[in-house]
Each structure stands twice: as C-alpha cells, then as structure tokens.
Amino acid sequence: MVKCGQLPNGVRFYSQYESSSSLELPVIVVNAGSLHDPHGKRGLAHLVEHVITEESKTFDSRRAGALVARACGGPDDDILITTSWAATTYGPSDMRRRAHARELFRMFSSMVRDPVIRHATTLVEKAAVHQEHYLFGEDVIVDRIRDALYEATFPKTFLARNPIDGYMEDVRQLKLSDIKSFVNRYYIPSNTFVVYFGPRHEEVKALVANEFGTWKKTDGKKWQKFRLPKMLGGFEPLKQPQEREVTIAGMHQHHAMIGFPTETYLSEDAEALDVLAFLFSERMYSELRSKNKKWEAGAYRTPVETERTFGHGIFSFHFATLDERFLVKGIETFREQCQLLCTELLSPEEVEIAVGFLYDYLFKDSFTRWTEGLLESVIQAAANGDTHLERLHSRGERLQKLLKRNGRQKLREVAQKYLSGNSATVIAKPS
C-alpha cells in the first residue's frame, strides 16, 4: 500500500517502502497539463516543462546536464520529464542509486520551486518543442489520427481535443511573460505533490520537507487569466455521429479509429470500461486478424483503449489494413460487436480472463514488483482527483466484484450506457 502525507504548506507526498533495495525513485508532479492551457496559448504547459528544466537558482545548466547524464544516461534516457493532460512530471523514470536519486530530487525540486526563466532559453525550447511536435506527433501516423479523433469526439470549447504539445502557431507566439504567469499560477505548494519510492514514510516526509517545507508563493488564484477553463459536467454523449477523413502522404495502410466519450477518471464505471476494452480488443483480434486469409486484407493490431482524466474520458478502437475494402468490413464488425456487448451477456470465462489479468498483473503486481507501473498509477490517481489514493487502493476489490453475482449484467449495462450511442470515426487513407 502507498502511504500518503501532506506538509503544512500543502505539498502532498506518497511513499512505498522497499526494505530489500538501496535504490530510490523520486518524482515531483505539478497539477498542470494541457487541460490547463489558456485559449490561444495551447502548448504552454509543455513549453514550461521544457524551460524550467534547463536551470534553477542552485543548479545551472552545466551542473544539471552533468547530473542527468551521470545518473540517467542523458536527457532522453531514463528520465520522466513529461507533460500530460492533467499534470507535468519531473524525475527519473525508474529506480536509481540512492545518492543519485537524492541529488536528482534536489535538482528537480529547485527547478520547480525556484526556476530561472530566461528569454534565450525560451527561444531554444520553443524551437525544440516545434521539432518534437513533428518527431513524436505530426509524423507519427497513429498519434496524428488520435488527435483527429479527439477533435471529432469533444466540443470545440473542450481542451482535451487539443494535442498535448499544443498548436505550433500558438507555441510560436508564446512570450516570456506567459511562462512566468503560468508558473506563478500553477507551480505553487498546494498544486504540487511528490511520489517517492524506497525510503520509509517518515524519511520521505523529512526529504520532502527539506526541499519544500519553506516554499511559499503568492496564491495562484490571483492570476485570473490562467484560471482552469470550465470542464464538461459529467458524461455527455455525442448528439450525432462525427466523421473525419484525412489523407496522409507516405502511408501504405488504411487506418480507422473509432471513439465514444465516457465519464471521467473518478467514474464508478471505470473498472467495467477497462474490462470491456480488454474483451473488445480480444474479440476484434479474433474477427479481423485470426479469421482473415487474404494476402492484402486483415489487421495486425486491434487495440481498444480507455483514457480518463479529471476532465475527459474516451473509449477508442484502432486498426489498420492494406485493403481499403477491408476497412469497411472492420468498421462494420466493430459496430456489430458493440451491439453484441449491449444486448448479450458476456460468458463467465471471458469475464474471468479479463478481470484475472487486470487484477493480477495491472493492479496487484504494480504494488509488489512493477515499480514503473505503480508510479504511473499513483501519478494518474493523485493528479485526477484521487488525492488520498482511496480509489487506487480499492481498484482490485471493484474489479473482483465484476466476477460476482450481477457482474455480467453490470458490464452489459455499462456497454449500453456508452457504446449504444453515436461514435466519432476517423479514417486515414494514403495519398
């Protein structure tokens, strides 16, 4: 079990003791991601992440670079400096030797607490964000299609529809004052937490207090223009089907991605949606890959995914094929399977397989032998409203309830709630 604590100034911390290891994993998280980007400044949270990790008042760029190279192999190796919809993280991506972990913690703490924000650094990092946008986004086919799916699924005023790295026309116009205002609004004690695995809880408390105990900042609410945009209230199904078609040069396969909006991270349907996604993926694999014998047709991967934050939720399916005619078959098969999940009960064997895997390997093992998975789970929970980790710790219990009486009926009801309405579909074709 992960223990929780909080300093008097509002900084929260989460720990898990590892008695047999001399390794530690400290990560600092700020509750500010792309969902917090102001209108007209999409990509600001991501740019802030880039700029403040260059140097701080106690770690200049040379010293910071040397430490990251020695402890992690460099800025692109075992490092977790990343922006998501809900949060931005700073730390190593897995366990490090104690001395290195603590020095990294000191460095990232100082960057979050006392960043040095320079105009020259801003210019450098804006250019880097521009290159990253194409390297890991625009030129990655699946990511480009996923961005189009989000745009089709969510209303124009909803920030989850925008790419995490933002719109490059917005990023190019961002100013030094925008970065400073964002930091003053969100990089404050009450909006920051630490995940620190390895030491005992009281030692983690002392380490966090040593870095953040005296941290005081102006109340972020005073920065009115950076207030969190109004989110959708609960689950809102699509009023009509949404379809997008894009043409991508240099692509060989035809792609389809289909999505339904769902409730947010704290939804009572979360575990049922995850079980349905697991089973849906298995069924689509059987239908689109295992039953195909034609050379040009069929599919290789058929992933069904659920993504939820405090501000949005989506249930999506993706496949690719060389045969354009098979693209139509795949979409029809998906809709047929949606109908089956909404009308027929799943077999006990199917439910046991899905729940068993999700419980044993994605839930239980994360607390005992999968540190990176637990880190991701804690960050996601704490950043999206489960600040005391009550839902995270009870996830296994809620999964196992689906194996008991009325569990299969619950799964059918959840399928009816989300998968019987209108969907958003993006089709990508080679030019």
Image (spheres, rainbow, N blue to C red):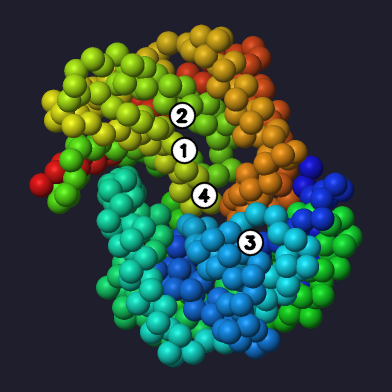
What amino acid type is highlighted by mark number 3? Pro
What amino acid type is highlighted by mark number 4? Thr
Whether label 4 touches label 3, CB < 8 Å? no
Residue 387, position as x, y percentages in the image: 69, 53
Please identify, in this view, whether the residue under mark 2 or under mark 3 is nearer the observer: 3
Task: Kindly identify which numbered label has been placed on residue 309.
Answer: 4
Residue 92, position as x, y percentages in the image: 63, 61
Q: Secondary structure at mark 2?
A: helix
Residue 54, position as x, y percentages in the image: 54, 80
Instruction: Please state which of residues 2 and 290 is positioned toward the viewer in this rendering.
Output: 290
Is the N terminus in the top left, top right, bottom left or bottom right quadrant? Answer: top right
Residue highlighted by disc 2: 277
What amino acid type is highlighted by mark number 1? Thr
Whether label 2 touches label 3, CB < 8 Å? no
Residue highlighted by disc 1: 306
In this rendering, position of residue 266 left or right of residue 332: right
Q: Secondary structure at mark 3?
A: loop
Is tag 1's residue or tag 3's residue first in the polypeptide sequence?
Answer: 3
Whether label 2 touches label 1, CB < 8 Å? yes
